[in-house]
């Protein structure tokens, strides 16, 4: 049995036994969710939690006043932002804005990997938000969060590989293990976090190019799948045009909106505004 097979089997065994250390959501995101899940919650209660984190408060105000969300009147307080945007949207935005806290490394090799992963997921999140804005029935803030968490299953693999020492230095072996395991791990993490079934499905199914849901409208998995595949353009992960033409999510996103993936210009104002949310 190869070193890769041993690592693969160990991480699967740890996952099944509950011994695998999974990432946890930052405390402020958990507190925000608890308030929003309360049917009697008010904007003031939610604002009181957010203002305890000065950095998060500043970022949320910038987001609320960004071209993507702002109204005619500038938003000058967190309570005003919550009232304007709504509790559900604020919950998704807060979760998205604090997600970067989980991408922290203790070694240079792990830091490089986590930076690359964060860059990839933020691009997918920005693309997902742009796509969702053109599709009826999909909220842009949910699409953004879905894009951010689609590859969350890679985190525990990288952490365990870094502990192993040798594997974190073997890109080929590590990439193979990640490719095989991260969707299953991602779904497990989101279940632990008690995310919605729709977001859990994003983690589990976005990599499934044979997914056939042509009888229902475009959903978050379709949006993120298209965004991920678009992010591979010009890289060694790019999918050939013949395969792309047979992927149903492209047809569903295009049929619902008239949007062609080739029309998504990474220099477009809408894309850059969405990406800027994570680079404040």
Image (spheres, rainbow, N blue to C red):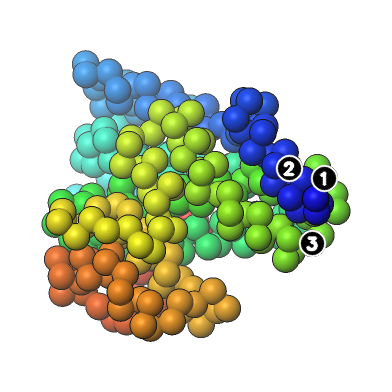
**How busy is the neighbourhood of tag 3: few (under 14 within 10 Å), some, or many (20 plus)?**
few
Give the farthest residue toward the right: 166
Residue displayed at 21% across by 65% down: 252
Q: Position of residue 137 (x, y in %)?
A: 15, 51
Task: Report if the CB atoms under discs 2 and 1 are less than 8 Å apart.
Answer: yes
Answer above or below: position of 96 versus 67: above
Counting residues from the N terminus, which is met first, the one under dot 2 or under dot 3? 2
The kind of secondary structure element at disc 1 is: helix
195 on left or right of 101:
left
72 on left or right of 124:
left
**How busy is the neighbourhood of tag 1: few (under 14 within 10 Å), some, or many (20 plus)?**
few
The CA span between labels 3 and 1 is 11 Å
Which residue is more in the foreground, 197 or 91? 197
**How busy is the neighbourhood of tag 2: few (under 14 within 10 Å), some, or many (20 plus)?**
some
Q: Position of residue 244 (x, y in %)?
A: 35, 76
Q: Is residue 65 visible?
A: no
Residue displayed at 64% across by 38% down: 12
Residue displayed at 48% across by 28% down: 192
Q: Position of residue 182 (x, y in %)?
A: 56, 49
Q: Name the residue that disc number 1 marks.
A: 164
The CA span between labels 2 and 1 is 6 Å
Q: Name the residue that disc number 3 marks.
A: 170
- Quarter of the image where one finds residue 250: bottom left
Which residue is more in the foreground, 198 or 29? 198
Counting residues from the N terminus, which is met first, the one under dot 3 or under dot 1? 1
- Quarter of the image where one finds residue 251: bottom left
Answer above or below: position of 51 versus 181: above
Task: Tell me the tag on residue 160.
Answer: 2
The CA span between labels 2 and 3 is 13 Å
Answer above or below: position of 81 versus 133: above
Which residue is more in the foreground, 264 or 215? 215
The kind of secondary structure element at disc 2 is: helix
């Amino acid at each position: 049995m190869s070193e890769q097979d041993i690592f693969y089997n160990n991480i699967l065994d740890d996952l099944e036994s509950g011994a695998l250390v999974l990432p946890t959501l930052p405390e402020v995101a958990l507190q925000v969710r608890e308030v929003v899940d309360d049917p009697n919650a008010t904007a003031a209660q939610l604002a009181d939690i957010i203002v305890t984190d000065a950095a998060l408060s500043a970022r949320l105000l910038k987001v609320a006043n960004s071209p993507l969300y702002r109204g005619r009147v500038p938003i000058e307080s967190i309570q005003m932002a919550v009232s304007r945007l709504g509790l559900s949207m604020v919950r998704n935005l807060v979760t998205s804005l604090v997600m970067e806290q989980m991408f922290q490394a203790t070694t240079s090799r792990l830091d490089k990997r986590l930076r690359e992963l964060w860059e990839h997921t933020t691009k997918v999140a920005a693309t997902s938000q742009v796509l969702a804005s053109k599709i009826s029935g999909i909220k842009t803030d949910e699409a953004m969060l879905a894009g951010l968490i689609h590859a969350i299953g890679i985190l525990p693999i990288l952490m365990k590989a870094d502990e192993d020492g040798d594997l974190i230095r073997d890109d080929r072996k590590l990439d193979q293990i990640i490719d095989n395991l991260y969707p299953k791990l991602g779904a497990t993490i989101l279940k632990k976090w008690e995310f919605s079934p729709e977001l859990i499905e994003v983690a589990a199914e976005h990599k499934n190019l044979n997914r056939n849901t042509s009888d229902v409208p475009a959903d978050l998995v379709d949006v993120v799948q298209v965004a991920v595949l678009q992010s591979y353009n010009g890289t060694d992960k790019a999918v050939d045009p013949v395969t792309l033409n047979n992927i149903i999510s492209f047809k569903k996103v295009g049929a619902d909106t008239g949007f062609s993936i080739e029309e998504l210009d990474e220099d477009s104002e809408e894309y850059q505004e969405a990406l800027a949310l994570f680079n404040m």
